[in-house]
Amino acid sequence: MAGRVHLVRHSEAVHNTDHDFNRLDPELTLLGQQQAQELANIFPASDEVGLIVTSPLRRTIQTTLLAFADVLDQRYFDEGSGKGISGGAELVLDPGLQERSALPCDTGSDPQVLEATFPGLDFSGLRAGWQVKEGLYAPDAVEDRARKVREYLADKIESLKDRNRRDVVVVTHGVFMKILSGDPAIDLPKAGWRSYSIEQGEDGKVVLVST
C-alpha cells in the first residue's frame, strides 16, 4: 500500500500574536511550543512516518523538532537528550516549502544563522540566498513551486513503498498549504494537520487527495 502525505501547519509564532510582519523569520511563542508538544501526543501516524520534509524557516523547524522528537532519527538531537529514535525518520529541509509572501516574517534566515540556531541539523542542501524571494521563490511563482513539491513528494512516496514506514510529513505554512494541497479553503489551526494520498490527476499532474 502506498504511503500518505500529512500536511502540518507550524504552531503559533511571534508574528501571529503581535502582528509585526516586519520581524525577520520569527520563532515560536511559548504557546506555539506547547502546541507542537501537544501535536506529538495526538498525531496518530507516528509509527508510519519515514520522512519529514520541512520549510527551513525557524518556526517550521522548531515545530518539527518539538512535534516529532519521537519520530525523527536521534542524530538530529543532542546526545543524551533522550530525543529521537534509532533508525528514525529522515529530516529534509526544503526551501520549496517556504511561505508565499516576501514579507520579512515569511523570509528565511541565512544558512549560517540557521546552523548556529540548530547545530544538529544539516543545512548543506540550502544554497546561499535561498531565502531571497526571486525566481522559483517569488510570490508569483508559487503555483510552479507547489507543482514541483508535489512531484518531489510523489517520488519520495514511491521510494518508501517497500519500507515499514511509508508516510511523509510535510511541515509548512498556512498560505502555501492552500496552493500545495490545491484546496484554497483549507485553514488548519496552528499545529493542525490533514492527511492525503498522492494521485495522478486527469491531466497527468500529481495531485493531493484528502483522505
Image (cartoon, rainbow, N blue to C red):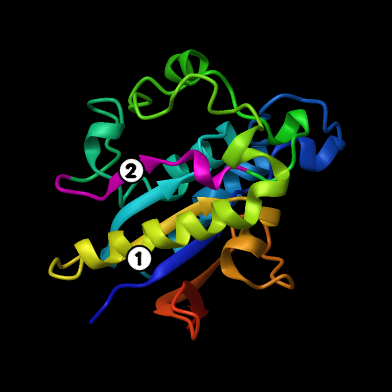
Q: Which of pointers 1 and 2 indicates the residue nearer the eye? A: 1
Q: Which residues are magenta?
A: 86-98
Looking at the image, which is closer to me, 49 or 154? 154
Quarter of the N terminus within the rendering? bottom left
Where, by quadrant of the figure, is residue 99 drawn?
top right
**Quick check: 153 above or below 195?**
above
User: Does label 1 or label 2 sit earlier along the sequence?
Assistant: 2
Residue found 54% across the figure and 18% down from its top: 110
Residue 11 image position (x, y, % from top left)? 62, 48
Residue 176 image position (x, y, % from top left)? 64, 54
- The kind of residue tagged 2 is Leu
Residue 35 image position (x, y, % from top left)? 60, 51
Local SS, label 1:
helix
Looking at the image, the residue that sits furthest to the right is 19
Q: Is 84 on the left-hand or right-hand side of 168? A: left
Looking at the image, which is closer to me, 10 or 185? 185
Residue found 65% across the figure and 32% down from its top: 134
Report the residue marked by disc 1. 154
Q: Mark 1 to mark 2: distance in Å?
A: 17 Å
Local SS, label 2:
strand
The reply to whether dot 1 and dot 2 touch (C-beta < 8 Å) is no
Q: Can I make out residue 40 in this image? A: no
Q: Residues within 10 Å of mark 2 (few under 14, many from 20)?
A: many
Residue 97 in magenta? yes
Residue 18's disc is none
Report the residue marked by disc 2. 91
Where, by quadrant of the figure, is residue 181 drawn?
bottom right
